[in-house]
Image (tube, helix red, strand yellow):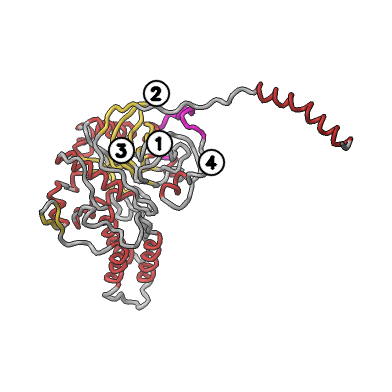
Amino acid sequence: MNPNKFLLAAAVALALPAVSALAQDKPDEKKAPEYVFTTVKENPISSIKNQYRSGTCWSYSGIGFLESEIMRIKGYKDVDLSEMFIVRNSYHDRAVKYVRLDGDLRFGPGSSCEDVLTVIKEYGIVPDSAYSGMNYGTELPEQSELDAVLAAYVKAVASNPNRTLTTAWLDGFDGILDAYLGKVPQEFEVDGVKYTPESYRDYLGINPDDYVSITSYTHHPYYSQFVVEVGDNWRWDTSYNVPLDEMMEIIYSAIENGYTIAWGADVSEKGFTRDGIGVVKEAPKKAAGSDQERWVGKSEEKPEENVSEAAEPEITAEMRQDGYDRKTTTDDHGMQIFGLAKDQNGNDFFMVKNSWGVTGKYDGIWYISDNFVKYKTMNFLVHKDALPKDIKKKLGIK
């Protein structure tokens, strides 16, 4: 053997016990315990859906919310309404407004849950079996091409190259929607009965005027209404502004009394994980292909640290306002709050239905802490009768 190699081998051999000893002396890394949830209250929800590669969470959460309302009112076990019927009519209305405003309006797939109510009030609703909106060759929504085509079309129209708009541009826009999503049925049949979208809405007992949007920010007076200033609120729908403690009182009271909530929130947070947990921790924004990947990353990425160890900060109205003003709280995602639970330490969590398919540890359900909801809620939609009487009176709601 080469003498130098022999000396090197001996040195390595002498070093190995020391390295081994160091490894043995190093204490095991403390692993945070997994959450164990106990359901306190659970209201009925419809089946989990998957918006996949579409920015239409607002429609999925709003429709899921109304499906639960129909189940509550009529006693149905499940309801399946068409999310894409809402999306199609919303896109039509937005195109008209965009052109009227010479393009000075955000044009894209995002919107608010209030938009769902407006579409239903104006156009009615249809079951998913009558209009799936999947007319472009994929099993799940993949609408980036559609979004890009529609945006380019209205931008060209809004530039008014003729200096006078033609009478054809809106028919052309609707033609694109028909090609990608399919033509909307004027009449359809459910259980042997024929309906129009309007008569089906009335049969289901949906009255859009029965629902109110609630928020809590300090830059507008409490017990008044204001337009939440985010780009996706393109219809300029208003929300009732209440103090933070009353906002939370409304949420708890609604769930405890059998109502659910269409919830708009910021989910681009480290504490909002793909495994179905949402607690308050800070994190940078993420971007990716599907809607889920956009906010919580891809499944093959390095898993985040277990969030159950960290103590959450106490949330104040000032923290909420600072997040809104400095854009650390943004209008990311719509979901449906439908239940209450406690973790193994007795902490309050909300049970939330997502629209990313049957995925994660809880098969499409997320457990969101009280503090996360308190901190990252933008606004939410709820039946007006779910409001506590004293708050309802302060807001002047009858």
Classify mark 1: helix, strand or loop. loop
Taking the image as shown, residue 329 lies to the left or right of residue 132, namely right
In the displayed structure, 158 sits above or below 90; it is: below
Contact (CB < 8 A) between labels 4 and 3? Answer: no
Q: Is residue 306 magenta?
A: yes
User: Where are the magenta residues, as a range?
Assistant: 305-321
Q: Horizontal and vertical percent for residue 368?
A: 38, 34
The image quadrant where one finds the N terminus is top right
Taking the image as shown, residue 143 lies to the left or right of residue 14, namely left
Q: Of the two numbered discs 3 and 2 on the same chain, state the one appearing first in sequence.
A: 3
Contact (CB < 8 A) between labels 1 and 3? Answer: no
At a point 83% along the width and 34% down the height, the residue shown is 8
Q: Of the two numbered discs 1 and 3 on the same chain, state the one appearing first in sequence.
A: 3
Which residue does the numbered mark 4 point to in the structure image?
302
What number is the disc on residue 344?
A: 2
Numbered disc in front, either 1 or 2: 1
In the displayed structure, 82 sits above or below 167; it is: above
Classify mark 2: helix, strand or loop. loop
Say which quarter of the image contains residue 131.
bottom left
Q: Of the two numbered discs 1 and 4 on the same chain, state the one appearing first in sequence.
A: 4
Q: Of the two numbered discs 1 and 2 on the same chain, state the one appearing first in sequence.
A: 2
Between 352 and 385, the residue placed more toward the observer is 352
Q: Of the two numbered discs 2 and 4 on the same chain, state the one appearing first in sequence.
A: 4
Say which quarter of the image contains residue 130.
bottom left
Amino acid type at circle 4 is Lys
Q: Horizontal and vertical percent for residue 111?
A: 33, 53
Which residue does the numbered mark 1 point to in the structure image?
361
Structural distance between the alpha carbons of marks 1 and 2 = 17 Å
What number is the disc on residue 39?
A: none
Numbered disc in front, either 1 or 3: 1
Between 43 and 397, the residue placed more toward the observer is 43
